Amino acid sequence: MSFNTIERNRQRQNLDQHDSLWLFGYGSLIFKADFPYIERRPATIDGWVRRFWQGSHDHRGTPDAPGRVATLIRAPGETCLGMAYHVSPKVFDHLDVREKNGYLRFTTPMTFMDGDHADGLVYIATEDNAAFLGPAPESEIAGQIAHSHGPSGPNREYLLRLADALRELDVHDPHVFTIERHLKDILMQPGVH
Ligand code: BEZ
């Protein structure tokens, strides 16, 4: 089963002519920046919400037991707060490989906290990708996350670190915090490791 988007991203957007670009992160990129960056600033994008609707077969789960990770879903009138990174185009070679399980790069307008604007690139796992799992009650999502593990570590670590990072940014994300609450309840149960 192949979900590989590396070549599609390279064909869709050739970044060679840029000295630097902005990258908008809303999931793991908020708490895990494993690449060099010139500057990072909190930013928002309009018309999107964060949802744990994407399957992870290669990082936080396995092909037989996928975990759940974040993607963005269109939601007119909503705003998603994340972290923008000013980076060299080489960073996208690294991220295209790291995020090859269904994520495509798109360009989005971003607003910084001081009201400045810039365009940024954002990775979105769209609903037509093979690893897309779609909506489920937050309690079920928490159950799946509690029991999933992959090469990058336990799925729970992704959710809990993201929730902590959002709190530090003063973001209230009801979807993430509801999953976190259910997850913590599950992890308190005897026999759950
Ligand atoms: C992010 O944190 O923006 C991100 C999430 C999933 C894949 C790629 C990037």
Image (cartoon, rainbow, N blue to C red):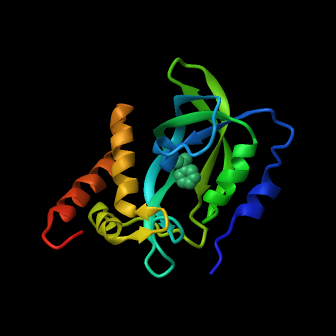
Looking at the picture, does residue 131 appear above or below residue 16?
below
Looking at the picture, does residue 15 appear above or below residue 133?
above
Relative to 184, 108 lies left or right: right
Front-lying residue, 175 or 65: 65
Q: Point out residue 137 in the picture as x, y percentages from the top left corner.
A: 31, 64
Q: Residue at x 44, y 54 (%)?
A: 51
Q: Point out residue 160 in the picture as x, y percentages from the top left corner.
A: 33, 51
Find residue 166 and report its image quarter: top left
Image quarter hosting the C terminus:
bottom left
Looking at the picture, does residue 148 appear above or below residue 173?
below
Q: Residue at x 62, y 43 (%)?
A: 35
Find residue 191 and report its image quarter: bottom left
Image quarter hosting the N terminus:
bottom right
Q: Residue at x 69, y 64 (%)?
A: 5
Q: Residue at x 48, y 75 (%)?
A: 62
Q: How many marks?
A: 0
Farthest top residue in view:
114
Relative to 185, 69 lies left or right: right
Looking at the picture, does residue 32 appear above or below residue 145?
above
Q: Point out residue 71 in the picture as x, y percentages from the top left corner.
A: 51, 55
Q: Point out residue 184 in the picture as x, y percentages from the top left corner.
A: 22, 57
Front-lying residue, 92 or 123: 92
Farthest left residue in view:
190
